[in-house]
Amino acid sequence: MKSKPGLVKKLQIIKVVTLITLTLLSVVLFIMLITDEEAIEAIGDHPRFLALMIVVWISLLISFASFAIDFIVMKRHYDLTKNLDELAFLDKLTGLPNRFSVDHMSEKYNTREKMIHLGCILLMINKLDEINSEKGREAGDRVISDFCTILESVGHKYGMVGRNSGNEFLVVIEDCDRNIMELFLGDLQRRIHNHNTISPEFSIEVSYSSVLSDTIMADRFYTLVTDVYRSFDEKAQTLY
């Protein structure tokens, strides 16, 4: 279950308001005591009144200390829940949004109106099983990591990039048309070619398919995803 750091923020605001109120009351009380001669005389004449004032000030100090501890605990809780939320939605190996993030997108694109001008690209690394068997799992992970670094650096300018499973990567682009999709694929092709020139021992070859929601009249996100997988099986193209 996704945590709600927003609740912590609201509690922090309440604590701040309460702390400011206590501070103002303490300052007003202190000013009244040092400026009111009768109060000063009463304190001198009545030890019980002095004891009461000491108890009040001790209570205020304890309250201040309690608020300070609460702020520290809430800050740590906020940082922890934020990190947990990020870990839950990020792939461990690549740092890309994972399957949970892709599933979460279905909640956003859940009507025909929200699906208008949405582009989806499915990419898979070719011969990954061969790389793992011939060069070892570490080499396979290196190829995946290098590809994801390239994919994220190119894709973030266009839309959301996610790792849907072990060797399945999705790029989702809003306000997309065929020209934008070709621009993305061209940028990705150049980066992959540069990588392969510099690191031929970890060369990358990728198959892909692309679909525009407007061409298939998709009314749900998974309608688009299903179609891009079908398109991949029928007519995948290659980048290298």
Image (cartoon, rainbow, N blue to C red):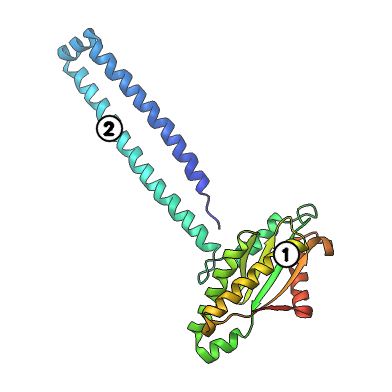
Mark in front: 1 vs 2: 1
63 horizontally vs 188: left or right: left
**Residue sitting at x 51%, y 72%:** 93
Dot 1 amino acid type: Met
**Residue sitting at x 64%, y 64%:** 102
The numbered dot on residue 181 is 1
177 horizontally vs 64: left or right: right
The picture quadrant where one finds residue 220 is bottom right
Counting from the top left corner in percent of width and height, residue 170 is at 66, 68
User: Residue tagged by mark 2?
Assistant: 61
The picture quadrant where one finds residue 66 is top left
- Regarding residue 182, the answer to whether it shows in the image is yes
Counting from the top left corner in percent of width and height, residue 67 is at 35, 38
In front here: 13 or 151? 151
**Residue sitting at x 24%, y 22%:** 53
In front here: 233 or 75? 233
Counting from the top left corner in percent of width and height, residue 142 is at 50, 78
Q: Residues within 10 Å of mark 1 (few under 14, many from 20)?
A: some
**Residue sitting at x 52%, y 80%:** 199
